[in-house]
Amino acid sequence: MPGHTENISAATSLVMNVAGVRIIGMGWGRSRPILTYTATSGTVEMDTANCTLENIVFVASVTIVTVGINVDAADCSIVNCEFDFDATADDFITAIDIDAVDRAAVINCRFIAENGTAGMAEAIRLDTADECQIIGNQFTGDMTDGCIVLEGAASDSVEIRDNRMWNGHANARGIVNSVGSTGIIRDNTLSYEDGQAMAQQLLATTSGSTLNWQITAHRSSVFDGGTGDSHGNDTGANDPYTIFTVTGDVIIKAIWGICNTTLVSATAQISVGVTGNLAALLALEEVDEILDGNVYVSATQAVGVANVAGSGAMFAINDGLDIIESTVTANCTAGQIDYYCIWAPAEDGASIISAAATT
């Protein structure tokens, strides 16, 4: 019923041991039933097949709750539930542990860990969890190992999609697949602290299907090529101008520029690429053709809308080559462009972040 509250103080506080039982909370928001964990050993046990927990709030009210829910039987579902903490340093180490069972489902749930405190290890842990579905969930806070962690032994034929993740921990991992689990892992997004390098934000081995696309923006400094060594000064100290700092091997799906102020030069050209291949990503374009409101995608301009570079074949960048903008032929003396890049890590520790805007 709405407003129901109950404490979980032991591993026997709530045991689902009758097949096919569904526990469905009534109400919305925090009027839903709230189960509060008051001991580190407290847990909810889903011990029999075909059981469901739905529309319930689970709150850690003590430091180091080992596991919030143990899923120990096949075909169990956790739907539209919320996992949260009560006060600073209260945390679940693992919110949901799915171990050696098939066809479990975690759908449309919300996981909230404390930001700035290394308490939760992972929200969802899978170990030998074949045909498991993790769909449409939200994750926020510091999770030291990752939001979703596949470890122990491989989980086959999993479906992990449409999840939205924000991990404030220094590792900033979203999905960790270190045991070669197989299945569909796609359409998941991960965001992170502003300026965070996202070290080890994806960990995967041989399973494939693990490209998780991110978007990074760079607000370029204005062109001031008439001033020595400024942005747009041909062959000056800031030519090339670093747009994105790249770590490790990455895949780029699309890259483009948005002109916010018309560029000024009679003969200068700009391009975007990497050291040794300066126009590999965006081809040389005449500066005097890049006007306010244009989309810079290639050697031709589009007003307001364009097919972005990379909409066909994707780009691979090897071993941390930064993405740079080059000015050639003459100085670009005025104007401003913002750049956007859609990318995914191809190895653990890979990232693309905005470089600092330089004048």
Image (cartoon, helix red, strand yellow):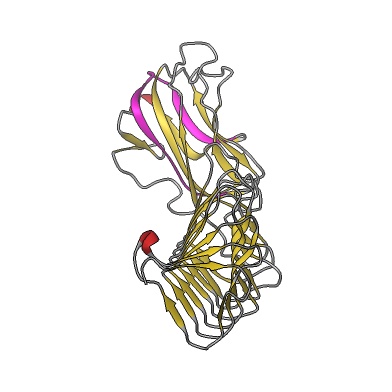
In this rendering, position of residue 11 left or right of residue 25 = right
Which quadrant of the figure has residue 304?
top left
Q: Give the residue furthest to the top.
A: 227
Number of numbered discs: 0
Where does the image place residue 209, in percent across and percent down from the top left? 56, 65
* Residues rendered magenta in the picture: 251-274
Where does the image place residue 29, in percent across and percent down from the top left? 37, 60
Where does the image place residue 333, in percent across and percent down from the top left? 42, 16
Which one is nearer the viewer's eye here, 308 or 209? 209
Magenta residues, dominant SS class: strand
Does the segment drawn in magenta span residue 104? no
Does the segment drawn in magenta span residue 260? yes
Where does the image place residue 164, in percent across and percent down from the top left? 47, 56
Q: Is residue 140 visible?
A: yes
Is 33 above or below relative to 316? below
Q: Name the residue located 33 percent from the left edge and 44 percent from the top edge.
A: 306
Is 4 above or below relative to 75? above
Which one is nearer the viewer's eye here, 74 or 272? 74
Q: Is residue 290 visible?
A: no
Which one is nearer the viewer's eye here, 229 or 115? 115
